[in-house]
């Protein structure tokens, strides 16, 4: 396998005529076509005045053009994918904070990003797909209103050029900019490829948003690193998933737990598609997968489910449960899967197995630091280890169990409660399909425990019954004092359940 240090060289892993990027109802673009498209796109960007290090924001819907735009624009500049669901004020902040020199949108786009870019003097480049083009092929048209003079070198990016910039979620503070070098993202693609034992025969069906590190790295870049193929859907859709499964015939897909749960709720109505599926495994990442959901997924699809632990600052994957014949430990996120992983106390000492502390990492996939934020970097790095902000513990086999985000641990009058522990107990209730435990303000205790739940279709359970169920299995101080039964729990833009800020969202602040 290639040990490429740039995205452009990584594409040489694929055989010229082999499929690379596809989509439902579209012919696949092969590796020869993709590499040619990348080279033409870099030349077009250079001709427009954009070069290595210039930041190009991308606001495109999910699909093959978004995937190939990421790959081809990163090959010669720096990509900055943004959520198409943002509003004007958000685009104003992100485009200015990034220092974007150009914005790529679909031809005729009505996105508020266009108005934002024009108000900031940022060139708007329009992407169009020629008639009959294979999935992922596109053309770019320059902005006649904003001429750009080249201030950066032309040509292909090098290993130490920034390939991708993303913002942290910013749930508790101003979002931080995470720059990821070509060698960072290529190392991560290699780690994922190795963990999942991807070969050119594999095909991933991507349902993850492609403005997020999960979708960009695991389905797209790891597949291309293996010379495999990726079919990019318009985004997650539980109603269409099973027909896509029939059409695309993927060997794997990767998703967040809420997506897996939505698929399980519809699997019984799509038994024939499930029986025909060619899946080799299923991957879960971006938030904790309840062991109950893992078991139901394996029973339904008849393939192993591997849970990975990942974050933007690590170019995605840090740990992952191994595929058979390796041992999968439900409730853990597996052993290190690329970078070094350890557990550290507050004073910077590495801890022995069995002792709870903060998960720390280091390795070639890890960012060198946040941009223009020395205070955040001083807090995030200790002795060259990056502090993830996640609390957890390793067992004797070095498998990591996460006990929660340090910022999400509930402090009830001095008693520290892991929301994940409460989640897993409530998930054992036969009527509970989904749950998120979170803190609510309390005038005397500081914080109190609350839980929002979604019930399985056709079942009933009162809030009191759910509390009683928890009281039989948890210490009294861990039992949620408030249980809300909802039709749907609010999610973030990538489908993750968020604990921080949920009390306010639900009117419990």
Image: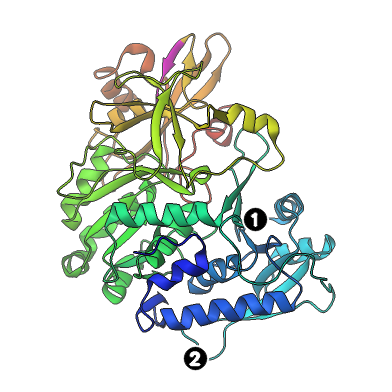
* Image quadrant assignment for residue 208: bottom left
Magenta span: 415-419
Name which quarter of the figure residue 290 lies in. top left
Residue at 84% in and 62% down: 119
Residue furthest out toward the bottom: 131
Any part of residue 331 in sight: yes
Q: Tell me the residue at 30%/72% (across/down).
A: 243
- Left/right placement of residue 297 relative to residue 39 reads left
Q: Position of residue 486 (x, y in %)?
A: 42, 40
Q: Quadrant of the C terminus?
A: top right
The one of 381 and 253 positioned closer to us in this rendering = 381
What secondary structure is marked by label 2?
Answer: loop
Q: Is residue 345 above or below residue 125?
A: above
Crowding at label 2, few (<14), some or many (≥20) Cα neighbours within 10 Å?
few
Q: Which mark is residue 151?
A: none
Q: Which residue is mark 1?
A: 86
Residue 381 drawn in magenta: no
| Residue 431 visible | no
Quarter of the image with the N terminus in it: bottom left
Residue at point 63%, 68% (across, down): 76
Q: By what rule are the colours in the image chosen?
A: rainbow
């Amino acid at each position: 396998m290639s040990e490429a240090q740039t995205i452009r060289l990584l594409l040489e892993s694929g055989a010229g005529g082999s499929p690379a990027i596809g989509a439902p109802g579209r012919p696949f673009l092969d590796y020869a076509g993709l590499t040619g498209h990348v080279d033409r796109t870099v030349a077009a960007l250079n001709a427009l005045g954009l070069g290595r290090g210039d930041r190009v924001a991308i606001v495109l819907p999910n699909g093959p053009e978004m995937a190939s735009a990421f790959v081809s624009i990163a090959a010669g500049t720096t990509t900055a994918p943004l959520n198409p669901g943002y509003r004007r004020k958000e685009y104003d902040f992100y485009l200015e904070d990034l220092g974007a020199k150009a914005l790529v949108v679909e031809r005729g786009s009505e996105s508020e990003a266009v108005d934002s870019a024009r108000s900031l003097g940022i060139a708007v480049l329009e992407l169009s797909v020629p008639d009959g083009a294979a999935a992922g092929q596109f053309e770019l048209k320059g902005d006649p209103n904003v001429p750009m003079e080249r201030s950066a070198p032309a040509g292909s990016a090098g290993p130490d050029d920034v390939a991708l910039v993303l913002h942290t979620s910013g749930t508790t503070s101003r979002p931080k900019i995470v720059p990821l070098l070509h060698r960072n993202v290529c190392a991560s693609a290699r780690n994922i490829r190795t963990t999942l034992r991807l070969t050119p025969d594999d095909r991933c069906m991507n349902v993850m948003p492609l403005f997020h590190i999960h979708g960009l790295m695991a389905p797209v870049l790891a597949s291309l690193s293996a010379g495999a193929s990726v079919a990019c859907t318009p985004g997650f859709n539980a109603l269409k998933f099973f027909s896509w499964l029939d059409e695309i015939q993927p060997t794997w897909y990767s998703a967040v737990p809420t997506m897996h749960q939505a698929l399980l709720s519809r699997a019984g109505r799509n038994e024939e598609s499930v029986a025909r599926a060619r899946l080799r495994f299923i991957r879960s990442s971006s938030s904790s997968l309840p062991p109950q959901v893992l078991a139901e997924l394996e029973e339904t699809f008849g393939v192993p489910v591997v849970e990975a632990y990942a974050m933007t600052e690590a170019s995605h994957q840090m740990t992952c449960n191994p595929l058979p014949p390796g041992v999968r430990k439900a409730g853990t996120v597996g052993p290190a899967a690329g970078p070094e992983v350890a557990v550290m106390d507050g004073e910077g000492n590495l801890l022995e197995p069995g002792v709870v502390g903060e998960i720390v990492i280091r390795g070639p996939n890890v960012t060198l630091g946040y941009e223009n934020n020395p205070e955040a970097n001083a807090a995030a790095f200790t002795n060259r280890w990056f502090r993830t902000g996640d609390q957890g513990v390793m067992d004797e086999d070095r498998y990591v169990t996460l006990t929660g985000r340090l910022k999400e641990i509930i402090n009830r009058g001095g008693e520290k409660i892991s929301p994940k522990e409460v989640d897993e107990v409530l998930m054992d209730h036969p009527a509970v399909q989904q749950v998120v435990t979170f803190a609510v303000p309390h005038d005397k205790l500081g914080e109190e425990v609350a839980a929002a739940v979604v019930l399985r279709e056709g079942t009933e359970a009162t809030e009191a019954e759910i509390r009683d169920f928890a009281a039989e299995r948890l210490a009294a101080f861990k039992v949620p004092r408030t249980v809300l039964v909802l039709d749907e729990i609010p999610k973030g833009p990538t489908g993750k359940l968020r604990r921080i800020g949920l009390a306010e969202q639900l009117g419990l602040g």
